[in-house]
Amino acid sequence: MMKVRFFLGSWMLCACAFAAPDFSSGLVGHWSFEGCDGKLVKDRSAGGNNGVIVSGALHKERATTSLELDGLGGHVLLPPKAGAGFSNALTAALWVRAAELRNNTVLFGVPYTNANWTTPMFGMYLSGKRVIYGLWGARGGVKSLVESPGELPLDTWTWLVGTFDGTTARLYLNGALCAEQPRTGAIVNNGQPLIIGKGLGHLKPSLSGRVGELRLYSRCLSPDEIHALYAHTSVAFDLAAPLAKKFKDGTVIVETHGSSPASEAPWRKNPTRLLEQLTGYTPRGDSVQVDRFGGWVDRPQEKATGFFRVQKIAGRQWLIDPEGQRYFNIGMNTVQEPRGVEKLFGSGEKWAETVTGQLRDAGFNGLGNGGASRLNKVAQPLVWVLRKNFMFTFAKELGLTEPASGTVGFLNKCMPVFHPDFEAFCDRFGRDLADTASDPLLLGIMTDNELQCPVDLLDRHLALDPANPKLKPGREAAAAWLAARQGGRSPAEITQRDRYAFIAFAFEQYYRIVAKTVRKYDPHHLYLGSRINYHQGEFDNPFFWKMLAPYHDVVSVNYYNQWGPDARQLAQWDAWAGRPILLTEWYAKAMDVPGLANLHGAGWLVHTQEDRARYYQHFALAALETKNIVGWHWFKYRDDPKESVALDAAGGANKGLFDFDGRAYDVLYQRARAVNREAYPLIQFFDARNRE
């Protein structure tokens, strides 16, 4: 990727006095929504290229009207000729007010013909919550990606301008130049339509937020003209930003590079909050009294049932331990014996006692997914979770699985949840849950892991082979659902809203059957769900979350690609489902461990162990501050070895709190220990501070 120069000036530029410029010179497209009927948007330029509004609501602004898009496929479609007329100069100016910053959300553009490709022929999209002004050139040429230095503000009207003058592509924010990149070559017209608010097809998130207007010029506006146009158009919008948090904690910068050293993304700077930077907080974790489960003895005792349960107290979700104490679950995933355990620890039994002691000393009060059974037999075992693979086992028996990273793949990514034998299989397969139904140390039961959930799950079901009796039930269920929903519309008219609603329908079939089985054979323990992980189709799907609520005690989420829990997103989940959240996978891997490739795995890539340690504290602090989070599980105990050839671990990766031989990374261990042991006082501190 070519180097991008950033200009770190103010995002807001004071309007200055300019001679009145000609804003119509070179204007080849101008779409605003004042006087719009909600169906068609008129082109106010001489081009006369009117567009069609697909699912949007008009919203009155200070002195104009905007179009509000719901993030479920709403957009404006403009005929292909809108992309014509550009050769070696371009200006595109968009007023936008984003409500969410989902990765790869398209703001506007003429898309590339391959819907899988993110960079448009020209246009803007979001990556890592930053604005990318993208340009393709002639076939075989180099694309340009001009990236904003900071995140796009939420709930704030922002003016984005991209220019190209034949030699340089530039990005402006609210009239101020913020980044540029050298570029040569013509602007190619590929015959695709111009789209506002989404990309080509259904593969990328669509915009959730408002669009004020879009202007296109067949020339490169000068900086003075851009300043003047900003002053001219900004008066129509309320530019006030949301009130900032009252309390300003300090941060340090940790750089990340996506999840792999092979990533095309640049190293990005992330403000990172540490325990010692909390304004007004004095550590007192050493004085906290806990019971044998790790529950908080210093708080009033709630009803004790002998098993874990959930309860909302003063607006915060809590796990309540078997003795009635409030409990925040801090767990470690995949705690398994190292190879050569006898040489390293003396025996498997000694290893189990040693690692349990190490975890407890570091403030971990639980074992997450994939813990060794030997750990349940130590003198003072940790709380644990049980995972039961209903769907994976059923699909394997049917011969409907294929390799997939981090999970079990299904043919065409369609789990056979509509197969008529699935419910009877679950009843048989789940009977041994009764064996652990009386264990008070068992937090709850997970089922399967990261069940595949592509956005086009509906399309994939409709494409299943009807001649295959194992696949036919899935195809028939989808066809019947679509016929009932669409009222005679053809499959070609499927919308993104249809796709999201079908995801909820298919997963409700799964959760209804599995949760019923779990509760039949183990009525005492929490149902923790299937560890969801899809940002698009699950995290952003209101139908999915509303469906989850009746079947889950706690929703388990493998939480990647966010630099700490997103308070806005968690609040949205709470509004949709009202269920407690357990963050069941997250981690960072550093480049300073010799021999580990770090090419695989969804965790963040950082430079050093100190960076990993800082990320741990940042993530933990945000989780403790969020009232519907009831715990987290770090992924994982040990690194993947460099000799690994597994699909999601080849070449090894620095995922562990401990190295492959079971030796702790001291700086990570100590920073994890410091914040883990403060968990209960920090919850008290955050709740009190946020009430002020």
Image: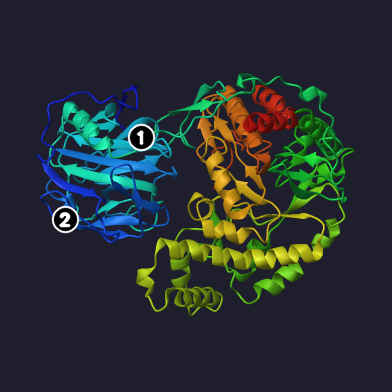
Residue at 47%, 67% (x, y): give it. 458
Q: Quadrant of residue 224?
A: top left
Instruction: Please tell me how crowded label 1 is: few (under 14), some (14-19), or many (20+) other residues with Cα within 10 Å.
Output: some
Q: Quadrant of the C terminus?
A: top right
Q: Quadrant of residue 7?
A: top left
Q: Report the front residue among 563 and 298.
A: 298
Do the CB atoms of the residues marked 1 and 2 lie less than 8 Å apart? no
Which residue is outermost to the right? 379
Q: Quadrant of the N terminus?
A: top left
Q: Which numbered circle lies on residue 239?
A: 1
Q: Position of residue 392 (x, y in %)?
A: 63, 61
Instruction: Please tell me how crowded label 2 is: few (under 14), some (14-19), or many (20+) other residues with Cα within 10 Å.
Output: some
Q: Which label's residue is closer to the chain start, 1 or 2? A: 2
Q: Secondary structure at mark 2?
A: loop
Q: Quadrant of residue 449?
A: bottom right
Residue 566 at least partly seen: no
**Viewer-nearest of labels 1 and 2?**
1
Which amino acid, by three-letter code, is at mark 2?
Asn
Q: Is residue 68 left or right of residue 310?
A: left
Q: Secondary structure at mark 1?
A: loop
Which amino acid, by three-letter code, is at mark 1?
Leu
Vertical relation: 479 (above or below) 582 = below
Residue 587 at least partly seen: yes
Q: Position of residue 83 (x, y in %)?
A: 18, 50
Which residue is outermost to the front? 63
Q: Report the front residue among 487 and 349.
A: 487
Q: Report the front residue among 219 and 335.
A: 219
Colour theme: rainbow
Residue tagged by mark 2?
49
Q: Position of residue 624 (x, y in %)?
A: 66, 35
Q: Which numbered circle lies on residue 577?
A: none
